[in-house]
Image (cartoon, rainbow, N blue to C red):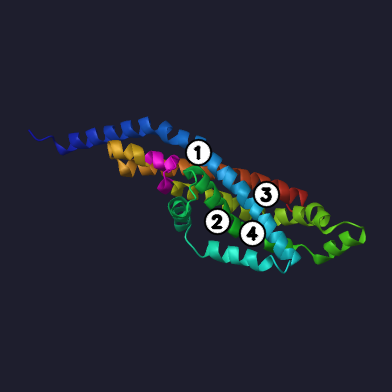
Amino acid sequence: MQMPIKELGIKMSERVIEVLSDSFLKILLPGIKVTIPLTIVSFILAFLISLIVAFIQHSKIKVLVPLTRFYIWIVRGTPLLVQLYIFFYGLPSIGIKLPAYLCAFLVFGLNEGAYMAETMRASIDAVPSGQLEAGYCVGMSYLQIMLRIILPQALRTAFPSLMNSLIALIKETSMASTITVVEMFRQAQIINGRVYQPFALYLEAAFIYLMFCSIVTFIQKKVEKKLNTYGGVK
């Protein structure tokens, strides 16, 4: 006997609720153990790269400036997914084999570093050049001036854009699933392969990503408020 449509709908709803309740922690835990650490270490690498590239461009080192521009051109002009595939699937063909997590860390750091480098360069250039000259007048070296005078002001200007890069990086880590890294989205795919509830499971994964990004956005607003207070802006 055929099951009534209403009863069938109730059974399906109960099934979806059961799948979501069982899978929530199974998706969340890889997010905490893999997605967040991968985001943090990649962001640190990207930030260090952005500082180095921005300093080179600001100091106008003739030999290195073309190299930094070439790096930015290549990275920003090619898809992140292609870069992941080159590192994970392409490098072994020339004898270089890296673990999946290390590939993801390097690619995310190099990719985001190119974008953040432009942010830092523009922020450093926005600091009045007279402060650099004043630093030289009191006997400070270029590095001392950059670290003690220019960089703190540039970071205040760049902070919103850097936080946007961090939020973007949280979402971009989902691409690590394509090179076998079992992060949050990959775990959702694994569970879906077993229970086949793609709509519900991927919505659940999206919700967890949204939670992570919302926390970062909340922190960003709090820090920006503090920076504006210290800077005399109300």
Q: Is residue 183 magenta?
A: yes
Q: Amino acid at mark 2?
A: Asn
Q: What is the magenta range?
A: 177-188
C-alpha distance separating marks 2 and 4: 10 Å
Residue appearing at x 82%, y 56% in the figure: 145
* Mark 2, residue position: 111
Decide: is 107 above or below 101: below
Of pointers 1 and 2, the one earlier in the residue sequence:
1
Decide: is 29 above or below 157: above
Q: Residues within 10 Å of mark 3 (few under 14, many from 20)?
A: some
Q: Amino acid at mark 1?
A: Val
Of pointers 1 and 4, the one earlier in the residue sequence:
1
Q: Which mark is residue 34?
A: 1
Q: Hey, which quadrant is residue 58 in on the image?
A: bottom right
Q: Which mark is residue 117?
A: 4
Q: Secondary structure at mark 1?
A: helix
**Residue 192 % position (x, y):** 32, 39
Between 171 and 216, the one lying in front of the other is: 171
C-alpha distance separating marks 1 and 4: 26 Å
C-alpha distance separating marks 3 and 1: 28 Å
Of pointers 3 and 1, the one earlier in the residue sequence:
1
Q: On the rendered image, what quadrant is the N terminus found in?
A: top left
Q: Depth-wise, is mark 4 or mark 3 nearer the camera?
A: 4
Decide: is 161 above or below 8: below
Q: Amino acid at mark 4?
A: Ala
Q: Residues within 10 Å of mark 1 (few under 14, many from 20)?
A: some
Q: Is residue 64 left or right of residue 192?
A: right
Q: Is residue 50 left or right of residue 91?
A: right
**Residue 123 % position (x, y):** 70, 60
Q: Is residue 73 magenta?
A: no
Q: Residues within 10 Å of mark 4 (few under 14, many from 20)?
A: many
Q: Secondary structure at mark 2?
A: helix
